[in-house]
Image (tube, rainbow, N blue to C red):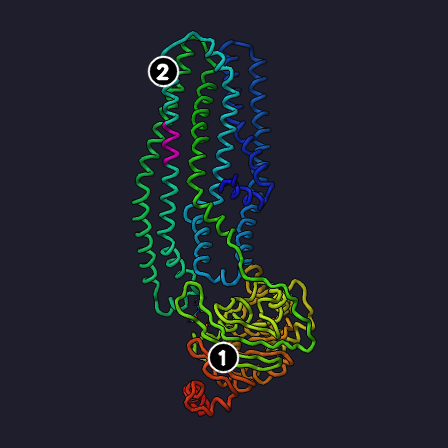
Amino acid sequence: MAESVTKRAFRMYSANNPKYFPICFLEILFEKISPYFNLWMSSEIVSAMYEKRGAGEIYLLAAITLFGNFFVRIGGAVLKRAADAQEKILKDNEAAALNRKTLSLDYDKLENPDIRQHRRKIIENAQINGYGVMHMADDIKTFVQSLVNVLFALVFLGEMFVLAARAPFRPAVYLLFAALAVCLVLKVIFNSLNSRKAAEANMELGNEMLEENRLSQGYYEAEGMDNRIYRQQTLISRIHDMAVRRHYEVFSRVCNGLIIRGMLGTLLSRLSGLCSYLIICYYCTLGVFPVGSVIKYVGCLGWLTENIGNLFQFFGEVRANEPFLRIYLDYFDIKNDMYQGSLAVEKRSDKRFDISFRDVSFRYAGQENLCLKNISLKLKVGERLAVVGENGSGKTTFIKLLCRLYDPSEGEIYMNDFNIRKYDYRQYLNLFSVVFQDYTLLSLPLGNNVSSAAVWDSVKAERLLEEAGFGERYGQMPKGLETPLYKDFDEDGVNLSGGEAQKVALARALYRDAPFIILDEPTAALDPIAEAEIYAKFDEIVGDKTAIYISHRLSSCRFCDKIAVFDRGTIVQVGTHAELLADTGGKYYELWNAQAQYYTKEAER
Ligand code: ADP
């Protein structure tokens, strides 16, 4: 039989910290025994006083109450502290598990808008209305609390049931018992219905508010420079007001019914309490129950009925939370389907890895049009290839296909004699060092960033930082390669400018020492002097590697052996700078002339 959604989610969730639930349940046991113990002892003391059993016994009972309370409280506090600490670990590990899943996804899945939305939904469901795994954990805790309460109440009420059973038959009492049972059943039905409706309302609320929340939050999270310059604070407040108004409208629409049902549930609770009271008092007046037991029986019977209601409500809550858990589990069930290949990549000291694109076309998921169309291109070992074209012409996508972040929709890419899909995926990825336009540096020491590893070769890292033009800035770092980047985890961390960060990213690419080096607009954030330095040293930096250099600035590409000109997803020209410029009707000539104007003006200044 298939495992239920909640059972599977609980198994997965609790595995994030197996210590948490046992400690938490033990704490519940300690927390719940306290009121029963006090009630029991108070009732014993009242009975002792009523029966005039003597001061000695009364003092003894009071002392037992005092010390018993002391030990239960101390034990409870220690367990609570332990449970809180374990809960923190559980939640951190759960967040880490979700992140690990995201990081393990194939890149095409990571960029897929539906999958991104799926992940956001999990996080927002938890943040907006608390549904999902945390709700499940709370439900389970409430269930255990109710169960412990019911068990304690039954134990403490055992004596009452025996006494009541021995009493002569009284129709009025049985009527009250029947009324109590009816209140209880109605309350369970109401509460279960309410839980389901609340979950449905929250699901609706969450779905309706997803976009608004993202929108209004996005403006606050943005760096905010535009907002300051254009004084957009008032406009942003209006967006916020619109979001709040919409939130309120949806909330009122879906939640009004819940409030009325909630009130009915409370009324039924009070009615069942009244029935309990009447039953006990009735038996007391008949002399069936000792007077001192009234407090004990009334309290315990009230808790019993309340918690039987909660026990049943648990099932309603679980059912209501199931759609949220399904969203959670479905995310973990997303399968990577990128073919991983098994062919070992040859370890070649001569770096002879030739690449050929054979009539390759590509379409992004959910897009109608092809992004790349019939791309055919050969790249020989040691070559310097420049990929140029206007923004959006498909240059970066071409690189993503080359690095197998995506597989072609049509056509094939070969490395030496085999389709690149056949090679072991990890080994194939190791062939490339890439500086992407939107690279990420981590909030870790510089050495970790350059080596992409826990340990680093300091001499090599420092040499490459120097080659990448970061030498001067590096000299100002007192802790050298141990200097943390950014201030997320360390106040002594250093913030880098866009240009400096790009140099570190370049050093990281060189550190890998892969046969291919790919630079996607590597000088975009560099100042002209740094850019000139990099160009001058480019051949030296790249050495015998095969290099691909992407740029929309044609002047940066002149030094390359071969230039491929992209236009609206196709390669329209391939040749050297001189060859391409000679074709006065070609795209390269057009782009060059458009940009040459700018360079001439620059030179004149
Ligand atoms: P370039 O690098 O030349 O600026 P890109 O390869 O980044 O061009 O983009 C080519 C086209 O593909 C653009 O129209 C862009 O909007 C689209 N595109 C890029 N990435 C994605 C993506 N992840 N999903 C859908 N479309 C994309």
Q: Using the image, determine if residue 219 lies above or below residue 72.
A: below
In front: 470, or 129? Answer: 129
In which quadrant of the rendered view does residue 513 lie? Answer: bottom right
Pointer 2: what residue? 175
Residue 551: mark: 1
Residue 130 visible somewhere in the drawing: no
Measured as percent of width and height from the top left, residue 327 is found at 45, 49
| Predominant SS along the magenta part | helix
In which quadrant of the rendered view does residue 472 lie? Answer: bottom right
Magenta segment includes 188: yes
Label 1 sits on what residue type?
Answer: Ser
- The residue under the point 31% across, 52% down is 246
Label 2 neighbourhood size at 10 Å, few (<14), some (14-19), many (20+)? few
In front: 413, or 595? Answer: 413
**Segment tinted magenta in the rendering:** 186-193
Q: Using the image, determine if residue 304 lies above or below residue 251.
A: above
Separation of marks 1 and 2 at Cα, in angstroms = 87 Å
Magenta segment includes 569: no
